[in-house]
Image: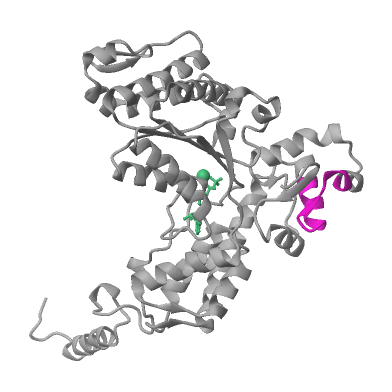
Amino acid sequence: MDTARGPAVGSLSLYFLDSAIIGAGVGNPFEEETGEAGRALDPARNPFRPGMGRVPPDFGGREPQLRRAKVVVDQLVHGHTPEFVLYRGVRGVGKTALLAYVRDQARRRGLQTLHVEADREDERLDATLQTLLRGLSDLLAAAGAEVVARLTTVSTTAQGPRLRSQGGPAATLEAMVDDVARLAEATGNGVLLTVDEVHEGGDLLLKPLLRSAHRVAQDGQPLGVLLSGLPTAAESLFDEGQTYTERLARVDLGLLERDGTAEAIRRPFARDAGLGVDELVVDTVHDGAGGYPWFVQLWGEALWDLATDPARLELPVAREAGERVHLRIEDFYLSRWRRVPSGRAALLVTALADAGGDAAIGDLLDRLEITHQAASPARRALLDLGLCWAPGRGRLAFSVPGFADWLQRTRPELP
Ligand SMILES: Nc1ncnc2c1ncn2[C@@H]1O[C@H](COP(=O)(O)OP(=O)(O)OP(=O)(O)O)[C@@H](O)[C@H]1O
Ligand SMILES: [Mg+2]
């Protein structure tokens, strides 16, 4: 290319155009020294964590529930057997995040942790048992050959530890929990076992787990068990009045009160950015999120990205954040609606929306002119999917705030 005689004027103007763009800082954010014009906080340092199972920067409104878990952890640290705890709540209230946080705290205090997520498809508990076995490697190494040789469900081979079945899946799981407790005692190392989504495992998982954990407690071995699941989890076992449910405390996780929302929003801003949040902003978040923890994280994330003043967060930013959050929440409602099974379940959901999102089932069925018996599978499906829950006997309600309004407003096509 002939640079000497080339189109000098054209190249020059291109050069000026480029430098004008770079000078204005609108071309390439990687070449900018500062962040987006007008924004006070770095989005890369955004502490909020909207998303399944993600530990929030601060658990708003969960002091009693966290205190319960701390007692469990502290007792294990001292070599005692804690009471077992079942955290229950609708989808998105923070069950998985709470268990993850407590496991982390337990490890920091020198405890061993094991974690299982129950799965409906795991009909023979194979995945559960293998997950437990994998989690035992440190304990097996610490216990020494003599102790390991006395375990009933684990045999050591040249390829590593292998599972020894004790007949059926339930018997093997029960014996496995005994082995975990034995290892905990032999190594002087408290063990915290967490099981998430226990409603998925049903009685197949819960009965052997609780039976053996009950025995462990009687023997005083340092094994703690924290479970979590939807509001109906383990209800049948409590109804049956099984003795092994005696040591299982039920702790509910509900929607956040205004104070809880305020904590969840204010603390991260104060700690990570030295920024104060106006009362009106907290009001806006509380109204917009309806106390639903997942939505509170969405709000926090948007407020952080959009903040304009490095010292205070005020109403105009909350308004802008509201627009952003609104779009995310609408997508979320739509995806929930798409998960509703077609047929009677969809009719029930529509009737529930028309009734404001919380109603007596009898009233809904009258309206739809279907019998309890005919509606029962649909009702169960909605509960199992976590789309609805039963706030009291004979009642049905949506598990997410704002869903009824959204359905009424948008009237989406039947799934
Ligand atoms: N106390 C809290 N305050 C603020 N945000 C929270 C709180 N607890 C959880 N969150 C946030 O809520 C969201 C949902 O949490 P998580 O996935 O643990 O809920 P879940 O109950 O396990 O839901 P699912 O039943 O769908 O599994 C996450 O973004 C998490 O960071
Ligand atoms: Mg979860």
Residue 90: percent from left, percent from top: 61, 47
Q: Specify whether residue 350 is painted magenta.
A: yes
Residue in the foreground of this view, choosing between 87 and 135? 87
Residue 52: percent from left, percent from top: 48, 50
Residue 7: percent from left, percent from top: 18, 87
Instruction: Assign the N terminus to one quadrant of the image.
Output: bottom left
Image quadrant assignment for residue 219: top left
Residue 325: percent from left, percent from top: 55, 68
Q: Residue at horizontal 19%, vertical 91%?
A: 9
Display colour scheme: one colour
Asked if residue 350 lies left or right of residue 174, the reply is: right
Residue 246 visible in rendering = yes
Q: What is the span of residues highlighted in magenta in the rendered image? A: 346-364
Q: Residue at horizontal 62%, vertical 32%?
A: 234
Question: Mainly helix, strand or loop, the magenta region?
Answer: helix
Residue in the foreground of this view, choosing between 259 and 163? 259
Q: Residue at horizontal 44%, vertical 15%?
A: 175
Image quadrant assignment for residue 240: top right
Residue in the foreground of this view, choosing between 106 and 21? 106
Q: Residue furthest left?
A: 4
111 up-or-down from 410: above or below: above
Q: Specify whether residue 401 is painted magenta.
A: no
Q: Residue furthest top?
A: 167
Image label count: 0
Image quadrant assignment for residue 57: bottom left
Residue 343 visible in rendering = no
Residue in the foreground of this view, choosing between 209 and 77? 77
